[in-house]
């Protein structure tokens, strides 16, 4: 895949020496970018200001709010105006909404994407678990959004549930004109991960990594450090994907690495019913423990990756 550029002015690419210097300057601090939070969800209707403040205090320096239809994409764009240079947005049509696609919807989507605060297409993809839209409709709408992303040179957030083979077939069919692809909330198997990486995809992890007990899924992927840090992104997927730090299957040696500050944000402000971006530090700490490195390094390297990919200021 070729490196894409969005309409937001990009910083010059960071060199390894830049990264090393930043890591030294920020030692012990977190510099996290949340690449997909659903802050337009009605669960945040009354206190989004507080959610943003807690995220900032927890070390979440940038948030991309993703849309799933025209209305939520417009609302995500509105939030970028309220919190400039902190919130950015993605605009797309989720596969559950694919049956509603028409020319007017495409025109509205393109209008939202034309704004400089909009840095990605998405969420879109294939979801065969619920099938609110027929698979044929989902594939058609995903193909249309892939073409839009390629035309506009924008990255695209793709979700996939129980549709891996069909998604790979679509990627193969578009191999010569693919935008940069982020696999949103990845929770698949080792073989699926390897296929996505072979296409040059970025892998975005959420609180789902706390739940996996399988021998061929996220647990093994983390244990064997299978995702290169320059392909790894972090997302809260708020209000979903609550990180359950109390899960019994998490080894005590891993739990010992969690900081009191990160646990405090999680347990004071987040629940199974409503996760927040301020929960991301504990997920960073879990990944760092598996990768045998410092959490601030994971946070900063994934943020550099996000800033380059999305062209964030």
Image (cartoon, rainbow, N blue to C red):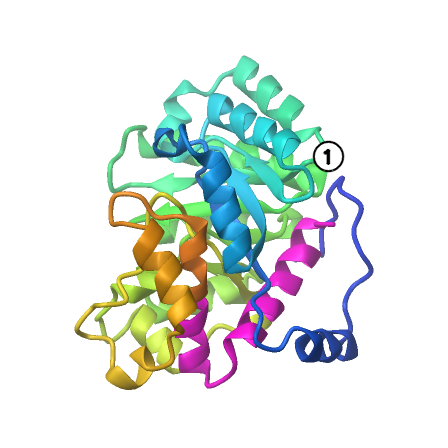
Counting from the top left corner in percent of width and height, residue 37 is at 46, 44
Q: Between residue 121 and residue 73, name the one nearer to us.
A: 73
| Residue with the mark numbered 1 | 116
Q: Is residue 249 left or right of residue 27?
A: left
Q: Between residue 43 and residue 174, name the one nearer to us.
A: 43
Residue lying furthest top: 104
Residue lying furthest left: 248
Counting from the top left corner in percent of width and height, residue 160 is at 38, 48
Q: Is residue 198 left or right of residue 189?
A: right
Q: Between residue 242 and residue 183, name the one nearer to us.
A: 242
Give the residue at x 50% y 23%. Answer: 70
Q: Between residue 57 and residue 134, name the one nearer to us.
A: 57
Counting from the top left corner in percent of width and height, residue 55 is at 50, 51
Give the residue at x 36% y 53%. Answer: 164
Counting from the top left corner in percent of width and height, residue 267 is at 30, 58
The residue segment tinted magenta is 284-313
The secondary structure making up most of the magenta span is: helix
Which quadrant of the view contains residue 98? top left
Residue 294 on the magenta segment: yes
């Amino acid at each position: 895949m070729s490196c894409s550029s969005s309409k937001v002015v990009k910083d010059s690419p960071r060199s390894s020496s830049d990264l090393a210097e930043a890591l030294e300057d920020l030692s012990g601090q977190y510099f996290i970018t949340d690449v997909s939070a659903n802050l337009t969800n009605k669960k945040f209707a009354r206190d989004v200001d507080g959610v943003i403040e807690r995220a900032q205090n927890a070390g979440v320096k940038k948030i991309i709010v993703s849309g799933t239809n025209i209305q939520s994409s417009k609302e995500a764009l509105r939030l970028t105006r309220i919190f400039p240079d902190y919130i950015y947005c993605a605009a797309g049509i989720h596969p559950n909404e694919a049956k509603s696609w028409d020319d007017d919807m495409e025109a509205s989507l393109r209008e939202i994407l034309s704004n400089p605060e909009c840095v990605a297409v998405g969420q879109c993809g294939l979801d065969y678990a619920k099938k609110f839209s027929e698979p044929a409709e989902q594939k058609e709408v995903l193909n249309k959004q892939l073409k839009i992303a390629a035309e506009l040179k924008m990255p695209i957030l793709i979700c996939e549930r129980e549709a891996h083979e069909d998604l790979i077939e679509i990627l193969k069919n578009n191999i010569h004109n693919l935008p940069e692809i982020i696999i949103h909330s990845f929770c698949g198997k080792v073989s699926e991960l390897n296929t996505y990486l072979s296409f040059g995809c970025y892998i975005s992890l959420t609180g789902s990594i706390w739940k996996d007990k399988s021998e061929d899924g996220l647990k093994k992927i983390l244990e064997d450090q299978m995702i290169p840090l320059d392909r790894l992104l972090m997302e809260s997927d708020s209000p979903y994907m609550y990180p359950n730090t109390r899960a019994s299957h998490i080894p005590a040696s891993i739990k010992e690495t969690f900081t009191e500050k990160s646990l405090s944000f999680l347990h004071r402000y987040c629940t199974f019913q409503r996760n927040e971006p301020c929960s991301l530090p504990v997920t960073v700490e879990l990944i760092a423990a598996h990768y045998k490195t410092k959490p601030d390094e994971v946070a900063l390297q994934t943020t550099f990756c996000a800033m380059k990919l999305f062209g964030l200021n």
